[in-house]
Amino acid sequence: MTHQEICACMSVLNPRSFEVCRCCFLPLPSRLSVHITGLPPDSLCPLASPVLSTQRCSTSLRMSTFFSETVWLCLAVTVVLGGLALGNLRKIPGQMRRKVVCLAGLWGGAYLLFSLSLSWGLILFFLSCVLTYTYLSGQELLPVDQKAVLITGGDSGFGHALSKYLDELGFTVFVGVLDEKGSGAEELRRTCSKRLSVLQMDITDQQQIKDAHSKVVEKLQDRGLWAVVNNAGIICLPADGELIPMTDYKKCMAVNFFGAVEVTKAFLPLLRKSKGRLVNISSMAAGVPMEKLAAYSSSKAALTMFSAVMRQELSKWGVKVSVIQPGGFRTNIAGTSEMWSKLEKNILDHLSSDVEEDYGKDYILQQRNYLKLINIKTNTDISPVLQDIRHAVSAKSPFAFYAPGALAYCLLFFVSFSPTGIFDYFSKKLCEVRGSMPRALIKQP
């Protein structure tokens, strides 16, 4: 459009516009400004360009003001939500990793608001806030209100420490022990409140489970049992799967899996009545293949799958099921030198001559170094495990899966999603550094 055409159009729309244009003033009609703002600057009337630029600046200023006000409003909402989130998250024990994820999602929504268009940014920011609120609302811990919890394996380790921890929080605690006259049971009676009861309960003995059930019902009367924590477990002497006697496989399954199943079946009616919680203590070894732990890992893997199925089946009753898979924590499960000697003798007594020839006695006796390594490298602070169990017992919406401990969750994630060959390569290199080779695989000079 030429200069003459523009002026002609202006004169038609506004007879005075041509004269006004001569006077260096151009009150362009709105319709005309809409049509000619898309034209190149040099095709417009020289006097029209400054006016159009002024109109663009005015429009941009109004849009900038609106956008700025919206951004500040959303930023203020984000700050408020962030403050509320921090206040609530402080009340959630043992969830540092999830706290970071939660806040990252909250501020990620704010970042998307600045990066994307206004409409999409607002939508994504709103969804981020909703998800954060939903997450936090389920993490609130329920009041104790004299809730009763049954814990197995309370002689030592996680079960012993958990019994003291929940007693301090005000729970009514029933502790099943292998020896009610042992030092662990006596310490619980001496240091805990009268709300705690010690029960003789070998979880491989059905009669002892029935007797413990009767005592729990007698004390609770009409109250339901709020939670059962299956914690009891044993570990066989770490060795190659071929070296472990079948008796040890059966023993691990009897304690780590079948014992938990027996306890669960016996106390499920009480859990259904209270719509309570079932918490099973498994192990990181249930999801991460580890050499020399075939019997232990297999039994814990069975417990993990049992928990997953029970979570689905019991949801209709309102019972929530969680599984705890701790990383490396130091407990008494590794045993003592006396126990190691008995296990070594048991392995050597059950070996066939050709297997003993291929592996060699020296290689077999070196397997106890793995247990020594457990006692040296594992974490002595078991509070992350206790806090996660408390969360599973007390939260409105407990997680189905917990992995307390350094790198526990990362290793489980790596095993689940990395190619098998990559994991096997690193595992093989690690084992080569730690131990020796079977005699038949050592190259002779």
Image (spheres, helix red, strand yellow):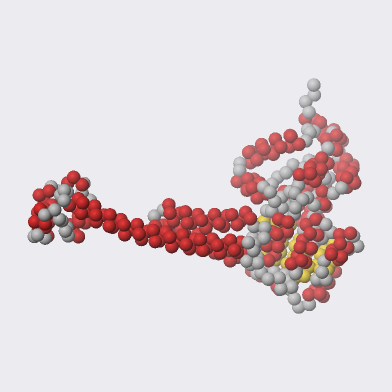
Tell me residue 325's x, y (percent): 70, 53
Residue 152 or residue 206, whichever sits in front? 152
Residue 294 or residue 173, whichever sits in front? 173
Residue at horizontal 64 percent and vertical 45 percent from the top: 415
Tell me the quarter of the image containing the C terminus.
top right
| Lateral position of residue 355 relative to residue 68, left or right | right
Judged from this view, the residue extending furthest toward the bottom is: 222
Tell me residue 273's x, y (percent): 71, 73
Q: Examine the rendering and report whether any part of residue 336 can be seen.
A: yes
Q: Examine the rendering and report whether any part of residue 303 can be seen.
A: no
Tell me residue 43's x, y (percent): 17, 46
User: How many numbered marks appear?
Assistant: 0
Residue at horizontal 82 percent and vertical 69 percent from the top: 193
| Lateral position of residue 99 relative to residue 56, left or right | right
Image quadrant where residue 361 sits: top right
| Lateral position of residue 296 relative to residue 10, left or right | right
Residue at horizontal 70 percent and vertical 59 percent from the top: 387
Tell me residue 251's x, y (percent): 83, 52
Residue 168 or residue 355, whichever sits in front? 168
Check the image and report above or below for 442 versus 233: above
Residue 6 or residue 46, whichever sits in front? 46
Judged from this view, the residue extending furthest toward the top is: 445
Residue at horizontal 82 percent and vertical 48 percent from the top: 334
